[in-house]
Amino acid sequence: MKILSTISIIILLLLIRNSASFCQNATTAKKIDIVICLDLSASTNGMIDRFRESYWNILNEINKLSPTPQIRIGIVAGGRNSYGKENYYVKQLSDLTDDFDALYEGMSKIRTKIEGCDTYVGKEMECAISKMNWTKETDALKFIFIFGNGPVNVGGLDYIDQSHF
């Protein structure tokens, strides 16, 4: 699982780094919204720790872009019984925000624990698309990054149909 999470973080960093051309020709800072969907089920136990370890590295990469884009990050999590069966075990942990310290503090409160539970990645995407306060600017970049090991076509929205959100 550690290799999977390391690869996921590298892919996220590459996406951000490749956003440089989006920012370089701009006279003003562009907006980039990123929602991270975290699988917190037993099969990914410890993934939240590895994400927290990489969090500041991700933000440091963003700050290397010029002009520095206006970044907001939101967190959706799934795979915890405590989030409720009626919600498909999915919960919005943080709306899109540029208060990165508060976001990190909130993530620090998520306990690493083994909790067997179903995961519905489609429902995580549905939550990310419908409950987040996405920027209305048409030239903004919008990313949903799924950080887990569940199939992306289980429960909720079909990821292919949502590529236009």
Image (cartoon, rainbow, N blue to C red):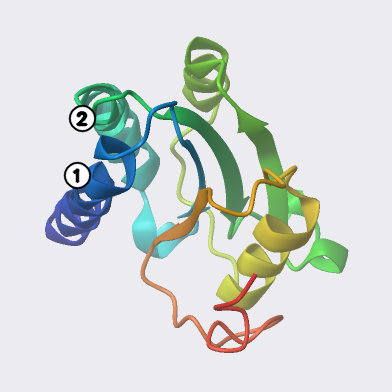
Q: Quadrant of the C terminus?
A: bottom right
| Residue type highlighted by circle 2 | Glu
Disc 1 is placed on an element classified as helix
Q: Is 35 in front, or is 43?
A: 35
Q: Are marks 2 and 1 in contact (CB under 8 Å)?
A: yes
Q: Which residue lies at the image location 36% right of the left edge and 58% below the top edge?
A: 44
Q: Which residue lies at the image location 53% right of the left edge and 48% below the top edge?
A: 140
Q: Position of residue 11 (x, y in %)?
A: 21, 57
Q: Which residue lies at the image location 19% right of the left edge and 24% below the top edge?
A: 64
Q: Dividing the picture into quarters, in which one does residue 122 lie?
A: bottom right
Q: Residues within 10 Å of mark 2 (few under 14, many from 20)?
A: few
Q: Which of the numbered marks, if any, corresponds to residue 106?
A: none
Residue tagged 2: 61
* Furthest residue in direction left, as rendered: 3
Q: Is residue 31 left or right of residue 43?
A: right
Q: CA distance from mark 2 to mark 1?
A: 7 Å
Q: Quadrant of the N terminus?
A: bottom left
Please tell me whether residue 138 is drawn above or below residue 116 in the rendered image: above
Q: Is residue 89 visible?
A: no
Q: Position of residue 66 (x, y in %)?
A: 24, 26
Q: Dividing the picture into quarters, in which one does residue 138 lie?
A: bottom right
* Furthest residue in direction right, as rendered: 86
Q: Position of residue 93 (x, y in %)?
A: 66, 37
Q: Residues within 10 Å of mark 1 (few under 14, many from 20)?
A: some
Please tell me whether residue 127 is drawn above or below residue 10 in the rendered image: below
Please tell me whether residue 136 is drawn above or below residue 124 in the rendered image: above
Disc 2 is placed on an element classified as helix
Residue tagged 1: 17
Q: Position of residue 75 (x, y in %)?
A: 57, 42
